[in-house]
Amino acid sequence: MSQNELLPCVEIETGADPVASVIWLHGLGADGNDFAPVVPELGLPDNLPLRFVFPHAPYMPITCNNGYVMRAWYDIVYFDSIDRHADEAGVMQSVTLVRDLIARENERGVPTERIVLAGFSQGGAIAYTAGLLHPQRLAGIVALSTYLPIPRLIDESRDTANAQTPIFAGHGTADPVVPLALGQAAQQRVAALGHPVQWQTYPMQHSVCLPEIQHIGAFLQRVLA
């Protein structure tokens, strides 16, 4: 999929002439509508007009779900009690799709350093990967209820452009889908590489909650002020 075949997206602008953009990636089997209702709950000020871009992932068969076709950012070949075995080619394809969306924001007048990559679950795994590998500095990364799908990629291919990019990582303490230990391992690995990570946990399952949404809103104001 080339740049003239961008993913379809739901877009919300919180004011005229947005000064920054948030590209927010949904979880496995959901679509771009999933997090659109979160925008009014973020508590953003009127003097910080943002464009929220919620892309729909491509449809693909998911091996660990008996080949069932759903919207996904990459195939999960199988998973055991703690690890997820992601398809590396699929992960990199989604990184390319995200780069195309970043380039479109650049064309619309938003520089890369005014763009936040956000994602939930599988979308958060791509936000982590695409953000840390991106060759230009981003404003921030938001990784929710997620993990590093190919940790080796971060070790081998991360770009120094985003070595100091702030990261917000949130996770539910009772998550039955992506265990808390996976989220902790990701943020610890990223922090050990020197990235500034704000880590928050919440008494919830595989979801978001209002305190987390408010923390995300505060993070966006801090990195985009």
Image (spheres, rainbow, N blue to C red):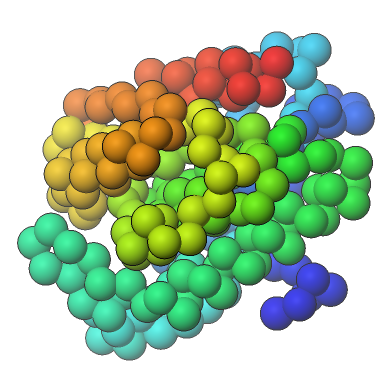
**Residue 205 seen in render:** no
Image quadrant of residue 149? bottom left
Question: What residue sits 37% from the left and 78% below the top?
Answer: 87
Question: What residue sits 38% from the left and 24% below the top?
Answer: 198
- Residue 130, x across and y down, in percent: 54, 56
- Residue 99, x across and y down, in percent: 68, 60
Q: Is residue 169 left or right of residue 137?
A: left
Q: How many marks?
A: 0
Image quadrant of residue 152? bottom left
Which one is in front, 13 or 22? Answer: 22
Question: What residue sits 41% from the left and 56% below the top?
Answer: 154
**113 to 105, vertically: above or below:** above
Question: What residue sits 68% from the left and 23% below the top?
Answer: 224
**208 to 127, vertically: above or below:** above
Q: Is residue 195 left or right of residue 37?
A: left
**Residue 154 seen in render:** yes
- Residue 118, x across and y down, in percent: 53, 43
- Residue 207, x across and y down, in percent: 33, 41
**139 to 221, vertically: above or below:** below
Q: Quadrant of the N terminus?
A: bottom right
Q: Is residue 100 left or right of residue 205?
A: right
Q: Is residue 71 left or right of residue 61?
A: right
Image quadrant of residue 137? top right
